[in-house]
Image (spheres, grey):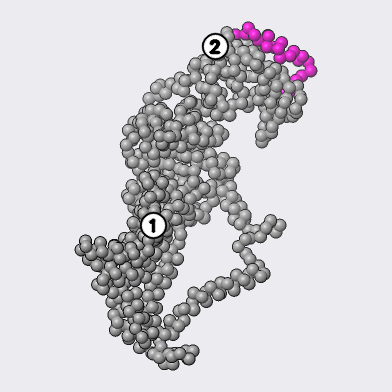
C-alpha cells in the first residue's frame, strides 16, 4: 500500500470519528428529547397510533360476527355469514375488476407523470407554469361537476364506458404522479446521466441502467398514489362506468345502503384495505439509492 | 527567445506546426451563447492539444472553462466552429460516439452499483460480458490503488477515494482524451497532492491526453505542462507553464495567474521607464508604451547593508542609458517595507520604492518587519514587458 492510499484511509476514519459527539461539544442533538418532552412524545405517538388503529377493531369484529346487537360490547355469535354474503354479492369479481382498473391507471399515469415532471424540472419548457397549472387543474375542480360534464362528452363521443373510466381516472391520477415525481427530480442529479453518456452509454442504455434504477423508489411511490386513485374511486366508476364496471367501492356502497349487511360490509371493507397496505409495505421497503445532488 | 512586447502571441513562442503528430484535440472558431441576453460564453476559441500531453485550462469563474470541456465531450452543442478529435470531426456526434471520458467535480459514482461495477460500466456499455468488463475494471482499480475496494458500495468511500474510482472508471473507457472538470477542487490540500501524484502515475502507465479545468494555479502547474488562459470566453494565451507565469502575453494573463507587480511606462532603447525608475531589459525589445511585469516569487528583499549607501535614484541614473540587463547584473532597488504577509513558509513583503509598491518575498532566514530599509533585487530573467493595455 502506498503512502497516498493510507492517507485516504485516515481521512475516512476521521470522518467517522466526527460523527461521534464528544464531551464538551456545544449544544445537544436536536433529535433527542428528554424528560417531559420525551414522555409527551411517546404519549402522542401512542394516541396517534390508537386513532389510526381503532376504526379497524369494529371492522375486524364485525367481519366475524353473525349477530351483534346494541347493548353488547362484543359480538354474540361468531361465524362466516358476512363472508358468505360478500361472496354472494360478487366480491371476488369486483375485487378483480378493482385491481385491474387500479393497475391500468397506475401503469399509464406513472410514466406520463414522470415524463411531465422531468420536462417541468428542466425549466427549458416553454410556458412551464401554464403547463403545471393545467396538469394540476383536475385536483382543483369540484369532482362531481367535472365528472358529470365529461360524462356527456364521453357518451356523445361513443367512448366505451370501461375506457372512459380509465381515461378519466388517469387524468385524475396524473397531478399526483407528476407532483411526486417533481419532488424526486428536484433532488435528482443529471450529472449521473451525463457521466454515463461520456462513458460511452447510449441514451437507452443510460436510461435502463442508470436513470430508472435511481428513480425507481420515486416511481414506486408515484405508482402507489395512482393505484390509490383507481382503487378508492366511486364517483367516476359509477357515473362514467354507467354500471358496466362493478368495482369494490361500488358493491361496498350498495351493501352499506341496505339494512342488516354490517358483517358483509365489514368483510368487503377489510378486503379493500388490505391490498394498499401490502403495496405500502413494498413501497416503503424500496431502498432509496439516489443520494441526491452531490455538492 | 526574444522577449518583446509584440512577441506575446499565444503560439509564437513555440510553433506547434514543427511537430508532426496530429493534434488530439482541435477546436476551430468555437463559439457558445447560452441565451440572447447573456454575453457569449465562448468567442471563437481556437485550440490545439497534442496527444499524450496534459493541459490545464485556467480562468476566473464564468470565463467559459467548463463550457469548453462540455463542448468537447458533446454535453453542450457549440453555436459555431468545429471540434476535431485526432483529426476526426466530432462536432455533430453524440457524447458516447466521441471516444472521450470525463471526470466531474462530483465523483458521480452510480450508487446502485458496486465500486467494481462502476469501473466496469464503460465496457458493459460497449457490449462486453460482465466477466470481461470486471477483469478490466480490476486492472484500472489497481492503477488508482483502489483494488481492495471493488466489492464496496460507493457511499462507503471517502470523497478522495470516490474521486479515485471516478478517474479509474473514466480510464476504463479507454478514452482518446480524458477530460477533468475541476476534479479535485472539493478535496483538502493533502488529498490534492495525492491526486496529483496519482495522475502522474497514470500518465506514466497509460499516457492519455489530458485536458483539465482548474481554478487552482498550483494544481495547473503541478498536473500540466501547458496552460490555456481563458477570460470572458476568449483564449488569452496557450503556452508552457513557465511562459504563462513569467512571459505572460498580456497584463490580463499576468493578473489572472496571480502576478502582483505591474508598472505602466515606456520602453526606450531597451530600458523601461516607470514609477519604479529605469529598468534595463534583456534582448531586443521594441520601444513604445509597455507595462513591466515580474513575479513577486522571483524577487527577494534583503536588509539593506550599511555599506551600500547609494539610493534608488542614483542607481536609476547609473542604469539610465544601459542597453541590456545582463551587462549590469541584477537590478537593485532600495525601499522601505510597508507591509508583510506570511503565506505558509513564505513571507510576502511589500516594499515602497520611490512612488511604487513592489511585491517581493523575504529571503529565507531574513525576518523583515514594517519600516525596515531593504534592497530589492530584480533578476534579469524575471523581468518581462507586456503591451500597454
Magenta stretch holds residue B305: yes
For the residue pair B340 and B153, the one nearer the viewer reads as B340
Q: Is residue B176 visible?
A: no
Residue positioned 37% across, 37% down in the render: B77
Spatial CA distance of label 1 from label 2 is 70 Å
Horizontal arrangement in the rendering, residue A1 relative to residue B85 (left or right): right
> What residue did someone put label 1 on?
A136
In magenta, the rendered stretch is: B301-326
Circle 1 chain: A
Q: Position of residue B163 (x, y in %)?
A: 50, 46
Q: Is residue A145 above or below residue B251?
A: below
For the residue pair B264 and A17, the one nearer the viewer reads as B264
Q: Position of residue A231 (x, y in %)?
A: 35, 70
Q: Nearer the viewer, mark 1 or mark 2?
A: 1
Find out whether the residues at labels 1 and 2 contact each other: C-beta distance under 8 Å: no
Magenta stretch holds residue B318: yes
Residue farthest to the bottom, as pictured: A76
Residue positioned 28% across, 74% down in the render: A246
Amino acid at each position: 500500500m502506498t503512502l497516498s492510499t493510507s492517507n485516504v484511509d485516515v481521512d475516512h476514519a476521521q470522518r467517522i470519528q466526527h460523527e461521534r459527539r464528544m464531551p464538551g461539544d456545544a449544544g445537544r442533538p436536536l433529535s433527542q428529547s428528554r424528560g417531559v418532552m420525551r414522555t409527551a412524545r411517546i404519549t402522542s405517538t401512542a394516541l396517534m397510533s390508537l386513532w389510526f388503529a381503532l376504526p379497524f377493531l369494529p371492522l375486524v369484529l364485525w367481519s366475524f360476527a353473525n349477530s351483534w346487537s346494541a347493548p353488547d360490547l362484543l359480538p354474540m355469535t361468531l361465524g362466516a355469514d358476512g363472508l358468505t354474503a360478500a361472496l354472494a354479492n360478487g366480491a371476488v369479481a369486483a375485487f378483480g375488476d378493482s385491481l385491474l382498473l387500479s393497475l391500468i391507471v397506475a401503469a399509464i399515469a406513472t410514466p406520463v407523470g414522470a415524463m411531465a415532471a422531468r420536462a417541468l424540472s428542466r425549466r427549458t419548457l416553454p410556458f412551464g407554469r401554464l403547463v403545471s397549472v393545467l396538469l394540476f387543474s383536475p385536483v382543483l375542480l369540484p369532482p362531481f361537476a367535472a365528472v358529470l360534464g365529461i360524462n356527456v362528452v364521453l357518451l356523445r363521443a361513443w367512448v366505451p364506458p370501461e375506457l372512459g373510466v380509465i381515461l378519466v381516472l388517469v387524468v385524475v391520477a396524473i397531478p399526483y404522479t407528476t407532483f411526486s415525481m417533481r419532488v424526486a427530480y428536484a433532488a435528482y442529479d443529471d450529472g449521473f446521466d451525463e457521466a454515463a453518456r461520456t462513458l460511452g452509454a447510449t441514451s437507452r442504455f443510460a436510461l435502463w441502467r442508470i436513470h430508472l434504477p435511481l428513480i425507481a423508489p420515486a416511481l414506486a411511490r408515484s405508482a402507489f398514489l395512482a393505484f390509490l386513485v383507481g382503487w378508492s374511486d366511486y364517483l367516476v366508476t359509477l357515473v362514467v362506468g354507467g354500471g358496466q364496471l362493478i368495482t369494490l367501492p361500488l358493491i361496498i356502497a350498495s351493501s352499506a345502503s341496505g339494512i342488516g349487511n354490517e358483517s358483509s360490509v365489514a368483510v368487503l371493507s377489510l378486503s379493500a384495505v388490505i391490498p394498499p397496505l401490502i403495496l405500502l409495505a413494498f413501497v416503503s421497503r424500496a431502498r432509496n439509492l439516489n443520494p441526491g445532488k452531490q455538492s | 527567445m526574444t522577449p518583446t512586447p509584440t512577441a506575446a502571441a499565444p503560439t509564437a513562442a513555440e510553433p506547434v506546426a514543427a511537430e508532426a503528430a496530429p493534434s488530439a484535440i482541435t477546436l476551430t472558431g468555437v463559439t457558445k451563447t447560452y441565451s440572447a441576453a447573456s454575453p457569449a460564453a465562448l468567442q471563437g476559441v481556437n485550440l490545439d492539444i497534442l496527444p499524450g500531453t496534459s493541459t490545464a485550462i485556467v480562468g476566473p469563474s464564468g470565463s467559459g472553462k467548463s463550457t469548453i470541456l462540455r463542448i468537447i465531450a458533446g454535453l453542450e452543442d457549440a453555436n459555431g466552429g468545429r471540434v476535431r478529435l485526432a483529426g476526426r470531426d466530432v462536432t455533430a456526434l453524440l457524447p458516447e460516439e466521441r471516444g472521450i471520458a470525463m471526470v466531474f467535480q462530483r465523483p458521480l459514482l452510480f450508487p446502485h452499483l458496486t465500486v467494481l461495477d462502476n469501473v466496469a460500466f464503460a465496457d458493459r456499455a460497449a457490449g462486453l460480458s460482465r466477466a470481461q468488463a470486471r477483469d478490466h475494471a480490476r486492472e484500472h482499480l489497481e492503477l488508482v490503488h483502489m483494488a481492495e475496494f471493488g466489492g464496496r458500495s460507493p457511499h462507503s468511500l471517502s470523497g478522495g477515494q470516490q474521486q479515485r474510482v471516478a478517474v479509474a472508471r473514466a480510464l476504463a473507457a479507454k478514452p482518446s482524451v480524458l477530460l477533468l472538470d475541476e476534479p479535485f477542487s472539493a478535496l483538502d490540500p493533502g488529498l490534492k497532492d495525492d491526486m496529483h501524484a496519482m495522475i502522474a502515475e497514470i500518465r506514466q502507465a497509460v499516457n492519455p491526453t489530458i485536458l483539465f479545468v482548474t481554478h487552482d494555479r498550483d494544481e495547473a502547474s503541478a498536473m500540466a505542462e501547458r496552460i490555456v488562459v481563458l477570460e470572458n470566453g476568449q483564449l488569452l494565451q496557450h503556452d508552457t507553464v513557465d511562459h504563462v507565469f513569467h512571459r505572460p502575453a498580456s497584463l490580463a494573463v499576468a493578473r489572472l495567474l496571480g502576478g502582483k507587480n505591474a508598472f505602466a511606462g515606456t520602453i526606450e532603447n531597451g530600458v523601461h521607464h516607470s514609477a519604479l525608475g529605469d529598468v534595463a531589459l534583456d534582448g531586443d525589445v521594441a520601444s513604445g508604451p509597455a507595462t513591466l511585469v515580474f513575479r513577486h516569487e522571483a524577487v527577494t528583499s534583503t536588509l539593506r547593508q550599511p555599506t551600500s549607501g547609494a539610493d534608488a535614484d542614483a542607481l536609476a541614473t547609473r542604469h539610465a542609458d544601459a542597453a541590456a540587463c545582463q551587462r549590469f547584473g541584477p537590478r537593485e532597488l532600495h525601499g522601505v517595507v510597508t507591509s508583510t504577509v506570511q503565506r505558509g513558509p513564505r513571507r510576502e513583503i511589500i516594499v515602497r520604492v520611490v512612488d511604487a509598491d513592489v511585491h517581493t518575498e523575504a529571503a529565507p532566514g531574513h525576518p523583515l518587519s514594517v519600516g525596515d530599509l531593504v534592497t530589492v533585487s530584480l533578476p534579469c530573467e524575471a523581468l518581462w514587458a507586456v503591451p500597454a493595455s
